[in-house]
Image (tube, rainbow, N blue to C red):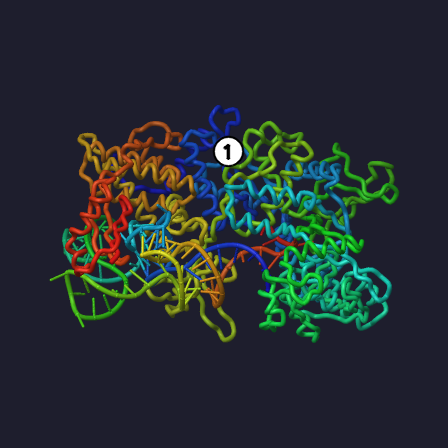
Amino acid sequence: MSGQAFDPSQADGRWQRAWDEAQTFAANSNSAKPKSYVLEMFPYPSGRIHIGHVRNYTMGDVLARYKRMTGHEVLHPMGWDAFGMPAENAAMEKGVHPGGWTRENIANMKAQLKRLGFALDWSRELATCEPDYYGHEQALFLKLYEAGLVYRKQAEVNWDPVDMTVLANEQVIDGKGWRSGAEVQKRKLNQWFLKITDFAEDLLEGLGALEGWPDKVRLMQENWIGKSTGLEFSFDLSNGDKLPVYTTRPDTIFGASFVAVAADHPVAQAVAAHSDEAKAFVELCKKGGTTAAELETAEKLGFDTGITAKHPFTGAELPVFIANFVLMDYGTGAIMAVPGHDQRDFEFATKYGLPIPRVVAATIEEADKPFAGEAENGDGVIVNSDFLTGMSVDDAKAEVIRRIEAEGRGSGKTVWRLRDWGVSRQRYWGTPIPFIHCEACGVVPVPEDQLPVTLPEDVDFKTPGNPLLRHPTWKHVDCPECGGKAERETDTLDTFVDSSWYFLRFASQPGDKPFDAAEVAKWLPVEQYIGGIEHAILHLLYARFWTRALAHIGMIEVKEPFASLFTQGMVTHETYSRRDGERVVYYAPEEISREAERALLTADGGEVEIGRVVKMSKSKKNVVDPDTIIAKYGADAVRWFMLSDSPPERDLPWSEAGIEGCSRFVHRLWRLFGQLDAQANGEDKALTRKTHQTIAAVGDDVTALAFNKGVARIYELTSAVEKAQPSASRNEAIRTLALLLAPMMPHLAEEAWHAMDEGGLIADAAWPAVDPALLVEDEVTIAIQHKGKLRDTLTAPKGAAKELLEEMALASEKVQRSLDGAPVRKIIVVPDRLVNIVT
RNA sequence: GCGGGUGUGGCGGAAUGGUAGACGCCGGGGACUUAAAAUCCCCUGAGCUUUGCUCGUGCGGGUUCGAGUCCCGCCACCCGCACCA
């Protein structure tokens, strides 16, 4: 091997081309090898790869390459979640076509991913914005419609009256449209829904078997699905109506001091029809955000309707309020309010001077204990509750349900927090919903032979509103049933639909159908899925739902799409800023020269404030561009940084010093690879042992996705090899290092493999075998504690008898000094680990 | 507000209830060099009366021979909350 330096700018491209030419990473579904499907969440083509993507895809790549080396046929595909609002925003701001903008972004980002040397099967690439993807999605949507899983109903949207458009929650800022600044209204529209609630029980139960998922994600989904058992019963109202309410706490029924309905509840509507004051209040509730967070943090407000509700047991007349914290979507849209044992009700009652009776207490003696400024929702014994007094919470729940049922006023009921999935979007850049509205025939599905319903290309975004709606010809069609004049549906699908089945399309891409069931059966479920924690609920739940729904209609066998899930942390960076009066001005890392304690602005040499380490974002300018750093340090150094230091599930702070260190290590390895010594012979037992321990540990670490630990072990082995004298063992260790690094630094590893004259690609090489006999040490270090503190350590043969260890411990001079003659009461011996002397 | 998570040296972090700080970064000292870069070697939690001792894993309690790890109560920050992807 020559003494030339490793030059990533040459080597990276050379090996990337070699893998392309050899089709190294094309997945062969007919292979006899065990199959492994490694998938990272596909990116939105925003224009540039973000460093967070680099981290995500590097992790998946290491696993995919490791799986190949350990004898698996690996499917590791990549695609584009290509529909969505940013393309329309770009169209409005820059006058470009969303399609052109998106496709250009895809080309750029694909080139960026290629420069990182990912082991991807590009032959399976897909983009959701192309008709050969979304056309199949339309077909699937119609199949779900036939199965009764798709329906239409009225639902509220955020309406911007100036831009004449529906706004996403993120486009509503302080109740105003982000572009127009106009006050946002809530408007009811007829929209398409998917019946995810039909699968609520199954989605919940399925979580139990998802052992490869983080507990936190399973718990978050469980809470989201929100199964609760309770009681639905009706109050008799003073106006003669009946008002059904739902409660999960029937045991507290004697603590009810008022009743509340949602602003859009029929009772509220009826009252508002006859009272200007009530109408004004209902209007007030309609302003402001629609999000749960906003509703629940808003001050509790109510309007007394003057109607009363008769308590089913006491006969007391409870006031009925319209309240802004009651949700129409949950239960019946009306509640019995028990301020003593529900915090929202407590705040409301306090504000409006309503009674707050106690009906649950820690003990029966505390029946009249005052509340300490907040509701108590814990367990206890029922008090002040007539026939329930003295019962446990659970017994009281059952008793109230029994009595209400016996009286025919209501019944026990299971209620889900999960709502049906509204998939209508009043936007252009999405999958057209394949339906036709005919005055004579109603809503008619587009016949399958007329799919795909493609988006018109000739649209502009200069005028406000949905381009599909105002397109001169697109929506006008003949009704497929009666042949009369009809109009296309102009809503498009939520982009979460696109990402709910893309992992099936990766398994096979037939032209005439969404996927080939046999191919899906070969590859699914995904063995390891990797993505951000921000997708813990929506995307992952929707994908689980679609997979179930498609299994339900017999299109596939698999019900759970992702056997294992890993949620990686974000990449963060410190911020650089100066205060300019009220404004804070941020500076990008490349405008800064960073010293040990301070940061200077290159432009004027003045100091800037070093801010907290936060998620990279354009507004704080703390972003680094992958292309820049790849050009400077090479793909392998960047990949190594992504894997080093931080545990993959936690945030990773980007730093210039850190990437410098990675780059140094790449070159240090290269020098080491040049030290193979053909003349060397003889064995270095300790180094061989270390080598085999490292092979085993790195394999375990990669399998567990604990890349930072694997990285640390490779550093250790590297240092050990550097210190070792030439020997056959050392040559073997160097060769092993190349193999261990192959998944992490594939370019350097290929270059080394080539230079070592090994032949073939290291990407195709087998992971080194471990000799289990070399994994166990024959000597161990024993810690000696006295009073729980370390006093001395000693070396003993592995598996030494307890008695021997005790004897050795007491023989220690340091231990004797610490004991200082105190009588030994007890000695605890943990074999091969420690001796603790208790006095 | 509700749900979920995280917290260990100057920094990122390691540690089946058993030697806290592996490994990396930063910093300091040294070697090589006319010099620098690169490279290599050593040191690097705090304090003290320094053969050693004491303190130390966000804060306050507890269990245990022994707690970063388990339990109870707090604090701070981060993620999600259904039309962002």
Residue A95 visible within the image: no
Residue designated by label 1: A75
Q: In which quarter of the image is the C terminus of chain A?
A: bottom left
Dot 1 falls on a residue whose secondary structure is strand
Amino acid type, callout 1 = Leu
As rendered, which of A123 and A251 lies closer to the eye?
A251
On screen, residue A620 versus residue A361, left or right, reads: left
Residue A127 visible within the image: yes
- Where residue A513 appears, as percent x and y from the top left, is 66, 31
Residue at x-position 48% and y-position 57%: A616
Q: In which quarter of the image is the N terminus of chain A?
A: top left
Residue at x-position 34% and y-position 32%: A768
- Where residue A148 appears, as percent x and y from the top left, is 75, 40
As rendered, which of A350 and A355 lies closer to the eye?
A355
As rendered, which of A325 and A179 lies closer to the eye?
A325
Location of residue A410 (image quadrant): bottom right
Chain to which mark 1 belongs:
A
On screen, residue B47 versus residue A319, left or right, reads: left
Residue at x-position 21% and y-position 33%: A677
Badge 1: how crowded within 10 Å, few (<14), some, or many (20+)? many
- Where residue A746 appears, as percent x and y from the top left, is 38, 38
On screen, residue A689 versus residue A392, left or right, reads: left
- Where residue A460 appears, as percent x and y from the top left, is 70, 51
As rendered, which of A36 and A126 lies closer to the eye?
A36
Q: Is residue A659 above or below residue A379?
A: above
